[in-house]
Image (cartoon, coloured by chain):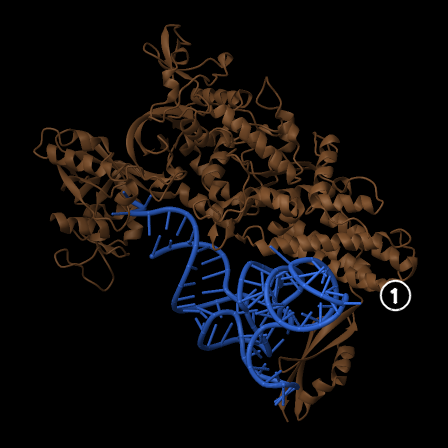
Chain colours: A brown, B blue
Amino acid sequence: MPGDYTPQSIETKWQKIWEESKLFKVEVDETKEKYYLLEMFPYPSGRIHMGHVRNYTIGDVVARYKKMKGFNVLHPMGWDAFGMPAENAAIASGVHPKKWTYENMAYMKEQLKRMGFSYDWDREIATCDPDYYQWEQRFFIEMFERGLVYRDRTFLNWCDSCKTVLANEQVEDGACWRCGTQVYLREYDQWFFRITRYAQELLDNIEALKEGWPERVLIMQRNWIGRSTGSLLRFQIEGTGDDIEVFTTRPDTLYGATFMSIAPEHPLAKTLPRGTSQEGAVKTFVDKTLKEDKFTRTSESYEKEGVFTGRYCLNPLTGFRMPIYVANFVLYDYGTGAVMAVPSHDQRDFEFAKKYGLTIIVVIQPEGEQLDADTMEAAYEGEGILVNSQQFNGMKNTEAMQGITEHLKALGRGEATINFRLRDWGISRQRYWGAPIPVVHCEKCGTVPVKKEDLPILLPEGVTLTGTGESPIAQVESFVNTTCPKCSGPAKRETDTMDTFVESSWYFIRYCSPNHRDKAFDRKEVAYWMPVDQYIGGIEHAILHLMYSRFYTMVLRDLGYVDFAEPFQRLLTQGMVIKDGAKMSKSKGNVVDPEEMINRYGADATRLFTLLAAPPEKDMDWSDQGIDGTYRFLTRLWRLAMDIRDLPGTSAISTVPASMEPVMRKTHQTIRKVTEDVDKRFRFNTAIAAMMELVNDLYKAKETVQGQDEAAVLKYAVEHLLIMLSPFVPHIADELWEAMGRQGRLFEHPWPAYDEQWAVSASATVAVQVAGKLRATIEVPKDASQTLVEEKALQDANVRRFLEGVSIRKVIYVPNKIINFIVAPG
RNA sequence: GCGAGAGUGGCGGAAUUGGCAGACGCGCUGGACUUAGGAUCCAGUGGAGCGAUCCGUGGGGGUUCGAGUCCCUUCUCUCGCACCA
């Protein structure tokens, strides 16, 4: 009896061999076609979880497969190492974030190694390393020089628990994306990346990504960018001579605009009421509204409220005195933060007008109906003919849009414009554990970027973290106090750090060329490896990380660092790991620890189960019994290989005995199936199922094997099976390969090609239907003629029984698949 | 409300181009292994029926010789966006 399958010892053995021989090390090789496979790098939280295991296993299968197909495969791994948990740990237990982070990285690296992933660890990067973030500081300065970075005082989402500002993309249902605390608005001086300058390109390029990205990710990005065409209009404020700017998609309704609504955050909400009797009321209203969280406040069902500012503006076409209201439903973030209100043709404005007794003027009459401002019960938002609109009366509203806009342009009161929902990316964080923003504030010169030769601006290490909301770096006087790069006078350093999404916006480029101290990366190396051929990660990054990375890559192109705009050619968003109907989480108590699974079943069984349980893009149900099953399969594979190894002879086939033809066919059909499933479809579950079928067949075949010729076919089959299994379960595959007496590592073995002759079976099973119902199946030679199949089908007793007493009206024959006799009575 | 996706055995899932629905795995049932079995092997396993056979892919309708797959309609669920001016 050969040794039993003991994954623990086998896996350690091969991991050591792979590591010592630097099997996974990769370099630029112009003679080979490259393939860059990237999985989203983890945050070093302490331990890997099943989501990581699934993500990285999928990636590892593809990486190993592509390598075997002859590609020069870049498959790197690193750490998204800045971030809040490190600080929270520091606040809770006093460990320095750096120590905490590096210890976690070390531990998780060992865990990843125990999974047998084929990473080139020589390319490992940690974003908290100054060798990494200094380049980001340089990019920041260069962006500053080009006006792609600016500072502005605005209202921002504030998370009280994380004590930091959040970008719009980082707010989910009004709550912090990380900790779930409700966010509210706070006014801050913030640094922004001008992502809006790239809105159109980000949108346009979506077209080119269609082939390789999931449609829903592109739709989400398109909606997030939110392009709409309309007009920018200016309304003169009575008495001040200033204008209120408004974006509208409905300039055709302008003659019906009877009041104005502005957002509570709008600067005019402060200045307009001054000196009017409404001053106090407006202040109370604004204060109250801003304290409410934005999600609740701007949800559709929320009570629409407003307050009159005491001021009016003039409708540029009718001269109508439009009272200006501050209204809680107006979004400061969208358009200009002010809306012209047309109560007759906008339901929201209608309700607001009714509530506050404001004028309603109908300007669009639907066909065959007569709207009356006094009696209408809802706004009419459809198409129709313009009325009360001076020279535009009688026109279709849709056709008048352009004319009205042009008319306004002639009056100097507006023009056609394109508006985006996308806002600039606020990157300031009042946190310690992040990359310092390389800027100083000088009383004389203002805000001045640090000189490039002074980079990196190192994060000071001796700080106390208290979680009070002030940036902890601000306490470090030796850091804060500096001299101005311009005038050399005393100045203070910026104490905000960058959003960690900045780090993850270019790490994939650094991987191509990771070990340079004197430059961010080598152009040639990057040109060779980029773009990423296949990116794999969670759907939760559909907008945030993926949009930022696309933007940042465009910026790097414009700064002259790279020659491409889109970093990720193909994207696979893998589903979540579910257990007992819910996402694994500590609070639900349904977490399965990968390390425990490795200890108990081995990495190979763990890998195999995550791949078998569901197609990669779908959510996957974790099942404790399921992994038992994959472990059983590997044990079965082990015994099969060992039994067949002990047969006489080698896998060199001289002739295929007739008795072994089915085995030979199954082997080549499996090669074809697995190749297609992995290569074209990323359907690892069906690829594994096919290999399981082969194992089942081989088990049967081995019971009756006789002589060396038959044994050779079995050995041949097992060896091919091992080659195909190696991307999925690399340890047992290498071990059995060695046990079969073969040399080398399967990672470096070419992927087998299937033999067309064997992959195509010599015969076909044809289903015989009478009147569309299955009555028999018959074996016929491959591609047999209809005459022959018909003849054979008609010999079948059951078929004949159903043809009795009826006449055949028509015969449908699909070669190798089906023959259908259409019958008529008599 | 808008957009996207999904609904198939007891469960996870197959069915790639309109052609034998339920591959593969889990679970379950029975048997073998002169003891035990959370091991292994063999057999069975969509439902009804002794059977021939009939029924069956959320519901209803349609196209077709033939529909899980295409069309219409409807229900349910998941995800994303959501007063976007």
User: Residue A294 or A728: which is nearer the viewer?
Assistant: A728
Q: Is residue A421 above or below residue A501?
A: below
Residue tagged by mark 1? Answer: A658
Residue at (61, 37) in percent of width and height: A112
- Indicate left or right for A271 with A722 as reference: left
The quadrant holding residue A197 is top left
Q: Which residue is nearer to you in this view: A801 or A770?
A: A801
Q: Is residue A476 left or right of residue A380?
A: right
Residue lying at the far left in this picture: please name it. Answer: A277
Residue A117 is left or right of residue A448, and the answer is: right
Secondary element at image label 1: helix
Toward which corner of the image does residue A669 lie, by quadrant? bottom right
Q: Quadrant of the C terminus of chain A?
A: bottom right
Chain letter of disc 1 in the image: A
Mark 1 neighbour density, 10 Å: few (under 14) some (14–19) many (20 or more): few
Identified at 41% across, 42% down, the residue is A224
Residue A595 coordinates in the image, percent (x, y): 59, 41
Task: Say if A806 sits above or below A44 in the image.
Answer: below
